[in-house]
Structures are given as structure tokens and as C-alpha cells.
């Protein structure tokens, strides 16, 4: 125990420094997230100018829509930043029920909206809600709550592990009926990752990874159009004008970009060569215009967000906020998995899937959902700081 004023002053000074360090919000996470959103707006605009001018007589059509979605998403992120994590923990089961209801509604004729043969949207006036996007948020919240409520059985009992897998199987089945194979893969991978972080034994974890991979591969093989995608992925140059057209055009974009790119706005592939240039393949346009250097920087920015989510989750565990910890892990996993799958598809190292690049690709529902997830992540980090400040305060009081 300190016995003189000099020692007490040192402790007080140390507390003052720590207090300043832990006040406020994670500015690095905020800054990197906003940077990715801004780069996404620029690339969506660049990739869509020609098609927007051709289809809508407005070169900035997609920019305005993506900008509105960014505004809504950031506003919701600020709102969620004010909501305590306890609220999401209490609401985790109702959120699961809401997710199931939403996915069922999409499949009901007259309520669900069909686009390009897929029933993934619910029309709400002038807006379309893609149910699979908010479902990602709801499922992460449910799984985080489940792991906390059943921590012991998840780690020791097979039934504790299989119950959430059963729920994910139901969710995946509804997604496959839309069909949305990509979202099923991302949710299953995220769920397995969260359960692993929750302490599932390695043997059981890897066994179910193998089962899930086999099941998804079987579904892909049994579906004719998915099988065609698989075959075109193996050798896109075998049929470069039909099944392999999208991938070959993306690879050409990467090749043209070389080290530093052809310059912002100077992409050739976006001029009606590369389908879905502003949505699923926006990263290929970025690679063409900004080159390998720009591509690596974007990968590093996404890696930072994933790393930061895991650090925040680990710190939440250390202050015994387990629901917040698993929620943070889930956010890091879903952003990382979806981002790297999209980038892998663009580069031709993974089969083509209809997945957006988080925070960047055109798609209001996706952008809003990931903004909301980042808002929750910032809230978790904020609560970590508050708890740390309380601990420091108690230590200073004890030594004063």
C-alpha cells in the first residue's frame, strides 16, 4: 500500500493517463470503416456510370442510391452505439424468431418479390428488404446469447452443440429455398466459428466442419446451375463466352491493373464486359483501376477490422462480458468470411457466389446491415472502456 504523497501522486497520475486513454470511442475502427465505405461509394460510382447512363439516363443513379443507404446505415450505427449490449442479450431469442418469420415471408407469393428467379426480397413501398441481410445480425445475436446461456453444455455435451446447428440448418434450408446459397455458406461458417470460440472441443468442431462442407458441396453438385458454376470455376477459359464469361472478364480486369492500375475511372471491363461490375465484382474493377497496390491496401483494411473485432471480443471476455465477446467474434467472423469469399471469387480462387463485398458493393440492405454490426462492435468496445475505467477507479481508490 502506498505510504507517502509521492507514491500516491504517481498512482493518481497513472490513473489520469489511463482515464484519458480509455475515454471516448475507437477512432481507428471508426476511421477505417468510414474509409472503406467512402472507397466503396467511389468504386460503385466508377463501376456503374456506363450501365446507369444506359438504363436510367443518369450516370450517378447507383451513387445516389448507395449514398442514401450509407446515410441510413451510419445513422442506425450511431443509434445502436447508444443501446446497451444487455438489450441485445435479452432480445436474442425474439430476434431468432423474427429471422425465421422474415425468411418465411419472403417465400410467400404476393409478399416476396422475385428478381432474376430468386425470391429474396419483401417490397416495402419504394424500398425492397432483402431478408437474408438483417438475418445475419439476428443470428449472430442469437448464437452469442445461446453460448452464454449454455456455456457448459456447449463445451461438454453433444446436445449443447447440436441444438444451434439444428437452428442453423432450418435457417439455411429457408435460404436455399429462395435460393441464396452464398448466405447459407457464410452463416454456417460464422456459426461454426462462434461455437469454436465458445469452447467446442476441436474433435467435434472439425467433425462438423467436415459434415457441413460435405452437405454444402452435395447441394452444389445436385443443383444444375451451381454445378455449372463449379465447372466454370475449375476452367473458366473452357467456355469464356458463356459459363466462364464473368470470371474470365474479372481475371482480365486483374491482369490489366498490374501494379498501380489504369487509373480511377479508366476501367475497360466495366464497359458492359464484366457483368455485375458494381455489385459482386466491384473488387475486380478496383483491381483494374487501382492495381495490385490498391487491392492489397483494401485487403489490409478489411483485415484490420477483423483483427480489431477479435481484440474487442477478447477484452470483453477479460472483463467477463461474455455475450458482448461472442457478438464481437461473430461480427469479425462474418465480415472476414464474406469479404474474403467475395475477393476469392473475384480472383478466381473460389466458385462464383452471389455475395456482396461488405461495406463496398452496391446493395443497400447489405451496407445498412454491416453498418449496424459495426455500430454494435463500437458499442462493445465503448463498454469495455467503461468497465476498464471502473476497474482502474476501484484500484486507485483502494491505494489512495
Image (cartoon, rainbow, N blue to C red):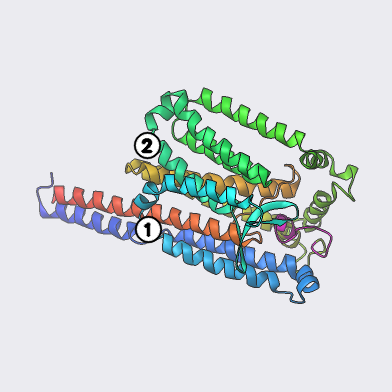
In the image, which residues are magenta? 270-285
Residue 11: horizontal and vertical position, in percent? 20, 52
Task: From the viewer's side, name the closer residue of 339 and 123.
Answer: 123
Number of residues whose C-alpha sits closer than 10 Å to that of mark 2, classed few (under 14), some (14–19) or many (20 or more): some
Q: Secondary structure under badge 2?
A: helix
Give the labeled residue for mark 2: 149
- In this figure, which residue is indicated by the disc labeled 1? 83
The mark that comes first in sequence, 2 or 1, is: 1
Name the residue: 63% across, 44% down: 175
Depth check, front residue: 361 or 382? 361
Which residue is more in the foreground, 4 or 358? 358
Magenta includes 277? yes
> Crowding at label 1, few (<14), some or many (≥20) Cα neighbours within 10 Å?
some
Is residue 196 left or right of 123 when viewed as pictured?
A: left
In the picture shown, does residue 91 fall above or below 203?
below
10 or 374, nearer to the observer = 374
| x and y, in percent, of residue 358 in the image | 60, 55
Membership of 255 in magenta stretch? no
Residue drawn 42% across and 64% down?
79
Label 1's element?
Answer: loop
User: For this view, does 254 lie left or right of residue 177?
Assistant: right
Q: Is residue 355 left or right of residue 320?
A: right
- Main SS of residues in magenta: loop
Q: Which mark is residue 127?
A: none
Residue 264 in view here: no
Q: Is residue 347 visible?
A: yes
Q: Position of residue 117 (x, y in %)?
A: 75, 52
Amino acid at each position: 500500500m502506498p505510504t507517502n504523497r509521492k507514491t500516491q501522486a504517481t498512482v493518481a497520475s497513472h490513473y489520469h493517463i489511463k482515464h484519458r486513454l480509455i475515454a471516448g470511442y475507437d477512432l481507428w475502427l471508426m476511421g477505417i470503416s468510414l474509409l472503406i465505405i467512402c472507397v466503396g461509394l467511389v468504386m460503385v460510382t466508377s463501376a456503374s456510370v456506363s450501365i446507369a447512363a444506359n438504363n436510367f439516363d443518369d450516370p450517378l443513379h447507383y451513387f445516389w442510391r448507395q449514398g442514401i443507404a450509407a446515410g441510413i446505415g451510419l445513422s442506425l450505427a450511431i443509434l445502436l452505439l447508444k443501446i446497451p449490449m444487455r438489450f441485445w442479450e435479452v432480445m436474442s431469442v425474439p430476434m431468432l424468431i423474427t429471422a425465421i418469420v422474415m425468411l418465411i415471408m419472403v417465400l410467400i407469393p404476393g409478399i416476396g418479390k422475385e428478381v432474376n428467379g430468386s425470391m429474396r426480397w419483401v417490397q416495402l413501398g419504394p424500398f425492397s428488404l432483402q431478408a437474408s441481410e438483417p438475418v445475419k445480425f439476428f443470428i449472430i445475436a442469437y448464437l452469442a446469447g445461446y453460448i452464454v446461456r449454455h456455456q457448459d453444455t456447449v463445451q461438454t455435451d453433444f446436445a449443447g452443440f447440436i441444438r444451434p446447428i439444428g437452428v442453423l440448418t432450418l435457417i439455411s434450408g429457408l435460404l436455399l429455398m429462395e435460393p441464396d446459397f452464398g448466405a447459407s455458406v457464410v452463416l454456417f461458417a460464422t456459426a461454426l466459428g462462434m461455437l469454436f470460440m465458445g469452447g467446442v472441443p476441436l474433435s467435434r468442431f472439425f467433425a462438423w466442419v467436415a459434415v457441413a462442407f460435405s452437405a454444402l458441396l452435395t447441394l452444389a453438385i445436385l443443383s444444375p446451375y451451381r454445378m455449372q458454376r463449379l465447372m466454370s470455376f475449375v476452367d473458366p477459359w473452357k467456355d469464356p463466352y458463356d459459363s466462364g464469361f464473368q470470371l474470365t472478364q474479372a481475371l482480365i480486369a486483374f491482369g490489366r491493373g498490374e501494379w498501380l492500375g489504369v487509373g480511377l475511372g479508366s476501367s475497360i471491363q466495366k464497359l458492359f464486359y464484366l457483368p455485375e461490375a458494381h455489385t459482386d465484382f466491384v473488387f475486380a474493377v478496383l483491381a483494374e483501376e487501382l492495381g495490385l497496390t490498391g487491392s492489397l491496401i483494401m485487403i489490409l483494411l478489411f483485415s484490420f477490422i477483423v483483427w480489431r473485432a477479435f481484440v474487442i471480443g477478447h477484452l470483453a471476455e477479460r472483463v467477463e462480458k461474455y455475450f458482448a465477446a461472442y457478438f464481437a467474434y461473430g461480427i469479425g467472423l462474418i465480415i472476414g468470411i464474406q469479404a474474403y469469399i467475395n475477393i476469392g471469387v473475384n480472383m478466381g480462387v473460389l466458385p462464383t457466389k452471389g455475395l456482396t463485398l461488405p461495406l463496398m458493393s452496391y446493395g443497400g440492405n447489405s451496407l445498412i446491415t454491416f453498418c449496424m454490426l459495426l455500430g454494435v462492435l463500437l458499442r462493445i468496445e465503448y463498454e469495455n472502456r467503461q468497465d476498464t475505467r471502473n476497474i482502474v477507479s476501484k484500484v486507485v481508490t483502494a491505494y489512495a
